[in-house]
Image (tube, rainbow, N blue to C red):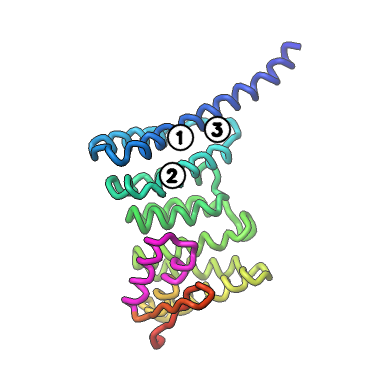
């Protein structure tokens, strides 16, 4: 009877601990949201330091087998953090990589998180080296079929390497790997990714400074469910490289490339 009670009590206690972690996830960020209109920069910076410590704790704490649950909660916290434009305009996006170190350490198969990592850490926080390092660590746990459409992660990595580090050789390898992984599937989306990734890799192999390849890569950013600020940045970069953006009647963006280099 005693063993039976322990068997029931132990999972219950663990669930309470995990729930407690979830409950402490939100107050700090809610406090930031409620106080953003009146808080001084000094106050916000203190709260960000507190958030940084909380993330460090979450990175090290035992999960009791609830890694995916913790990853999901921290991802929800990140969405609140990233979407709070008023506070981010004051404090920046420097905590972005810490969120994803927790998320992807707990769940390296969390596909959507890699997209958030690339945009928030490379584009907004200006830390592409850290974004790439986090992606590389996660990729060690993945395969072409796990998770589904994991080839996108290689594309995100290639985008960061080409556009933010200017490392055409590394980007070429990432796009080639994306093409290889995507080619293993026969559905339309995978075949499209395989073809476009392979073309980008070939352009980079022939001409590391190819404007065509850079425009293609910024096009990926533009069409990757980007927010308004990211869209404006991508359009600006495409036009600076000699490309043009045409919006179709259906509301999609069509890229007109300059003469091939």
The percent coordinates of residue 147 (x first, y second) are 61, 54
Q: Which residues are magenta?
A: 218-241
Q: Nearer the viewer, mark 3 or mark 1?
A: 1
Residue wearing tag 2:
80
Residue identified by numbered label 3: 63
Image quarter in which the C terminus is found = bottom left
- Residue 45 visible somewhere in the drawing: no
Asked which quadrant contains residue 36, the reply is: top left
Helix, strand or loop for disc 3? loop
Q: Residue at x 27, y 37 (%)?
A: 39
The local secondary structure at tag 2 comes to helix
- Magenta: main secondary structure: helix
The residue tagged with tag 1: helix, strand or loop? helix
Q: Residue at x 62, y 72 (%)?
A: 191
Work out how far the residue at label 1 is from the one at label 2, CA to CA, in angstroms. 9 Å
Do the residues bearing badges 1 and 2 touch, measured as CB atoms within 8 Å?
Answer: yes
Residue at (65% x, 68% y) in the render: 184
Percent position of residue 214, x then y: 39, 74
Residue closest to the eye, 181 or 258: 258
Q: Is residue 227 magenta?
A: yes
Looking at the image, residue 29 sits to the left or right of residue 155; the answer is left
Q: Foreground residue, 239 or 146?
A: 239
In the rendered structure, find residue 26 and report the number of the disc placed on it: 1
For residue 20, above or below residue 239: above
Q: CA distance from mark 3 to mark 2?
A: 23 Å
Instruction: Describe residue 145's horizontal placement relative to residue 43 as left or right.
Output: right
| Mark toward the start of the polypeptide (3 vs 1) | 1
As displayed, is residue 196 above or below residue 5? below
Mark 3 against mark 2, which lies toward the viewer?
Answer: 2
């Amino acid at each position: 009877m005693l063993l039976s009670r322990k068997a029931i009590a132990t999972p219950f206690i663990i669930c309470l601990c995990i729930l407690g972690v979830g409950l402490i996830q939100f107050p700090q960020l809610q406090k930031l949201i409620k106080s953003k209109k009146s808080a001084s920069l000094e106050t916000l910076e203190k709260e960000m330091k507190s958030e940084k410590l909380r993330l460090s704790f979450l990175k090290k704490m035992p999960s009791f087998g609830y890694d995916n649950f913790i990853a999901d909660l921290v991802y929800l916290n990140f969405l609140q953090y990233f979407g709070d434009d008023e506070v981010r305009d004051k404090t920046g996006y420097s905590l972005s990589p810490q969120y994803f170190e927790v998320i992807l350490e707990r769940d390296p198969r969390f596909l959507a998180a890699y997209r958030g990592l690339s945009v928030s850490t490379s584009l907004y926080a200006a830390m592409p080296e850290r974004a790439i390092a986090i992606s590389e660590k996660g990729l060690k746990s993945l395969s072409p079929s796990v998770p589904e459409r994991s080839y996108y992660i290689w594309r995100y990595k290639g985008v960061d390497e080409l556009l933010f580090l200017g490392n055409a050789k590394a980007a070429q390898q990432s796009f080639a790997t994306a093409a290889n992984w995507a080619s293993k599937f026969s559905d339309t989306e995978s075949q499209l990714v395989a073809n476009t990734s392979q073309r980008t890799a070939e352009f980079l192999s022939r001409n590391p400074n190819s404007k065509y390849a850079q425009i293609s890569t910024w096009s990926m950013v533009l069409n990757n469910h980007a927010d308004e600020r990211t869209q404006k940045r991508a359009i600006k970069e495409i036009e600076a490289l000699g490309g043009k953006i045409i919006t179709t009647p259906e509301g999609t963006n069509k890229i007109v490339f300059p003469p091939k280099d």
